[in-house]
Each structure stands twice: as structure tokens, then as C-alpha cells.
Amino acid sequence: MKLTIFGLTVSSSWGNGHATLWRGLIRALASDGHYVTFVERDVEWYADHRDLTELPGGRLLLYRDWADVLAERRTLLDADTVMVTSYCPDAVAATRLIEAEATGARVFYDLDTPVTLAALAAGEPVPYIPPEGLGGFDAVLSYTGGPALDALATRLGARRVAPLYGHVDPAAHHPVPPVEAYRGDLSYLGTYAADRQPLVEALFLQPAAAAPDKRFVLGGANYPGDFPWQPNIWFMGHVAPPAHPAFFCSSRATLNVTRRDMAAMGWCPSGRLFEAAACGVPIVSDNWDGLDAFFTPGEDILLASNADDVLAALARSDAELTRIATSARARVLAEHSSAVRARELVALLDAATSPAAAQAAA
């Protein structure tokens, strides 16, 4: 299969969750003999933090002007599937191009479905959604399952909707020796987001204040100068993907905090969940609908709604935490690896282009 993707970014992991996911998925697709071209606008903030310049098993096309894309449209549209993703800065232009000239399957992949639906509910514009909705695509894939799938059909006219959840590349995320700079009792890796801040305060900052003898380690971009740091919190700034395993493996446990819209919608596991599990680290997470479809609470993951829950998790013995981490790692490798997700994607694309699927859509 030849696949062309018009997306946000694969070249820079700074301040976004898309790049790491695409890298794992494209690597897995290439291993199965597929070829991917990723089309990305070359913007300053990603160029300044670029940590990938070539796409193994595929092609990375960075462009400054849409005219550069149009000059290569024959090559780009000569694909079995052409995909547009959420937050692609030229999503509408890409949609118009593939509607007019693509001969393969036309697919939209929303990696930010709760954000998309929340904006629509608030009457706000969604710049990566065509004004007429998503009815012109052969298939619409969603990073979020559950009720979000019905909403994409009823509110945006998607004709064929299926979930394509997050995943992890075990070649990139696996147990490694701890690194002293990242050493801690509890770590948290995530870009700053105002809507996530109340939970960060409840599940990270308050436990840090209540346990001054413990070391808390935070990594991520865009944290403001007035962030309420505690003396026992060590800030690492942006942690590049190659350093994620060392970051996770250097703490007794790591925290997952879900963004507000995603938690409210449910069925939206973050890539960080799968990454930490693949690294063999015990996870403490906020709870949301559908989480138990990916991890079994108490067996694969520990849930927390307040600081006391977090401190209780950290009070567990090393043997208990190791048992939970081992169970989560086994489950993620079996069900949520990039290779598993790549095969799911190919099956979804095959179904979207089959005569039976076309008849069902009609």
C-alpha cells in the first residue's frame, strides 16, 4: 500500500503528541512492506525543535508554501490512500485537492476528536474540518472511541467511522537502566495545558507538597514562569522521544493526566499511557469512561482522584508496583503496539475501499 498523509508534524515531537505516534505507526507500516509519504508544513516552532529529518521506510515532504505541494501533486496523489489529519494547517486545501484529483481512498483521521467536538458544541470554528463536514471522505478514523464515533457521524456527516487508538513502538519504548538526572518517586511527562492544570495540581503538586521527603520529576514544554513549583519538584523541560524510556524508568511510578475534553468524552487513551507501560513503569492515572477497556484498574494500573490516592500508590511495596507494571507491559505489547495498530489501519483501509464497503456506505 502507498499512503500519503497530510498531517500536523512527524518531524518534531516538541509540544504535540502527534509526532511520536506517527513515527511508530510508519515504522510498523514500513516493516509490513507499505510506503508512507508524510506531508508537513515547515513552520518555525517545529523547525527550531526538529528531531527527525528523514522518515525511515517512507518520505518526509516539508513545504513552505502550498504551491510546493501542488507542484508534486501527481506523485502525492498517486497513492492507494490519501489521508488528512486534525490540526493539519492546510487541511481544507488538502481536502479540496484530494476531492478533485485523488483516485485512491480518501480518509480523515481525527487525533483530537474531543477537542473537535467541544469546539463545535461551543460554536467555535474548527479550521481543519471542511465547512461541509466530513461526508466527502470514504472513511473517518478517530483517536477516540465510544460516543465520539456517533458524534462524528451525526454532527459532521462521516459516512464510515472507526476508532484507531493510540499505540506504542516497543523498539523505541522499553525498559532501560535509570538515569540519575531523572530519578524520582513520581514522574509526570506532559506538555502544559491550562485545562489539565487542576488535575496536575491535585495529583502532582499537592502530593509533592504533602511529601517533602520524596522527589517529583516533571518533563514537558510550554510551562509558564508562574507555575507553582514546589522545592522537591525537578523540572526537565522538553524531553525528546529517545529520552522517554530513561525518563519513565528512573521513577518508582509515573503519573498520567488526561486533558479535560478527552476525559469528558472518554475512550481516549493517551500515547503516554502506552509508552510508560511499554517501559515497564507502574502508572497512576486519573479515571475516565473506557479506561478499563485498555487497562484493568488494580491489576494493570492504579487510579487516583486526589492527592491521598497518589500517596497511597507511592506507599505500595516495590513488589506490588513491579507486578502492576509487568501486567501492563504484557497487555500493551499484545494489544496496543504500533505493529498491532498498523495492521488495524490496513484492515480499515481495505474495508473502506472494498465493494461491500462501498455498497454499505451507499
Image (cartoon, rainbow, N blue to C red):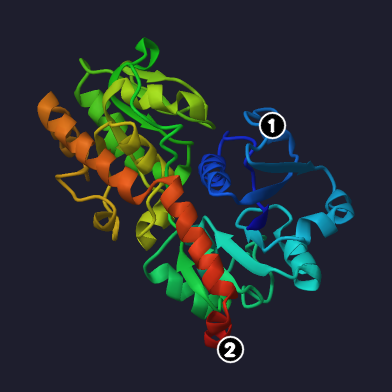
Image quadrant for the C terminus? bottom right
State whether residue 142 is above or below residue 333. below
For this orientation, the residue located farthest to the top is 180
Please name the residue shown 46% across and 74% down the image: 151
Q: Secondary structure at mark 1?
A: loop
Instruction: Confirm or deny contact between disc 1 and disc 2 (CB under 8 A).
Output: no
Nearer-the-camera pick, 221 or 198: 221
Left or right: residue 117 compared with residue 196: right
- Residue 316: x, y in percent? 11, 29
On the image, numbered disc 2 is attached to which residue? Answer: 362
- Residue at the image point whose x is 21% and y is 35% from the top: 326
Question: Quick check: can you spot residue 122?
Answer: no
Label 2: how many residues lie within 10 Å, few (<14), some (14-19) or many (20+)?
Answer: few
Callout 1: 10 Å neighbours few (<14), some, many (20+)? some
* Residue at horizontal 29 percent and vertical 53 percent from the top: 294
Judged left or right of residue 329, residue 92 is right
| Amino acid type of the residue tagged 1 in the rendering | Thr
Farthest residue toward the front?
33
Residue 53: mark: 1
